[in-house]
Amino acid sequence: MNRITSEACKQLIQNNEAELIDIREPWEVEICSIGGTRIPMHKIPEVAESMDKSKHYVIVCKTGRRAESVANLMECAHGFKHVAILEGGITNWFETFEPNYEMY
């Protein structure tokens, strides 16, 4: 699994080179979001087989820990080849692009 910076992630998304998957719980997404597809972590095993394995995905959570587990599951159990996690999660994203935003 790869780790990418907030800057690299933003570039991939802007260039439509990767799909962002936000695995946080709905209540977390209500507080702050950077877009992407919302699939709570516990739903990934249910939907993984219907996802396009040829696409590039960036998995995001609050700090990157849950994203690491999900990326590992996608690669090892479901055969995904192009999965990255947002290093530092959405917390790092906001520290990078909106440093005055108060995180939860």
Image (cartoon, rainbow, N blue to C red):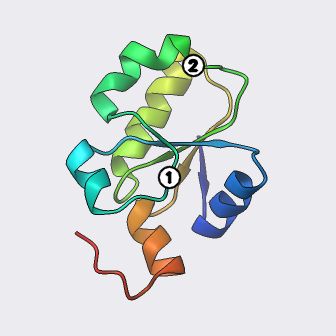
Quadrant of the image for the C terminus? bottom left
Q: Within 10 angstroms of label 2, few (less than 14), some, or many (20 or more) residues?
A: few
Is residue 77 something that shows in the picture?
no
Residue in view at x 35 percent, y 50 percent: 65
- What amino acid is at disc 1? Gly
Task: Residue 45: give x, y in percent of width and height.
Answer: 38, 18
Q: Within 10 angstroms of label 1, few (less than 14), some, or many (20 or more) residues?
A: few
Depth order, front residue of 52/78 = 52
Task: Residue 25: give x, y in percent of width and height.
Answer: 25, 43
Residue assigned mark 1? 35
* Discs 1/2, front: 1
Residue in view at x 31 percent, y 52 percent: 29
Residue assigned mark 2? 51
Task: Residue 1: give x, y in percent of width and height.
Answer: 59, 40
Residue at the far front in the pictured view: 30
Depth order, front residue of 34/88 = 34
Q: Dividing the picture into quarters, in which one does residue 55 lie?
A: top right
100 lies above or below 3: below
Q: Secondary structure at mark 2?
A: loop
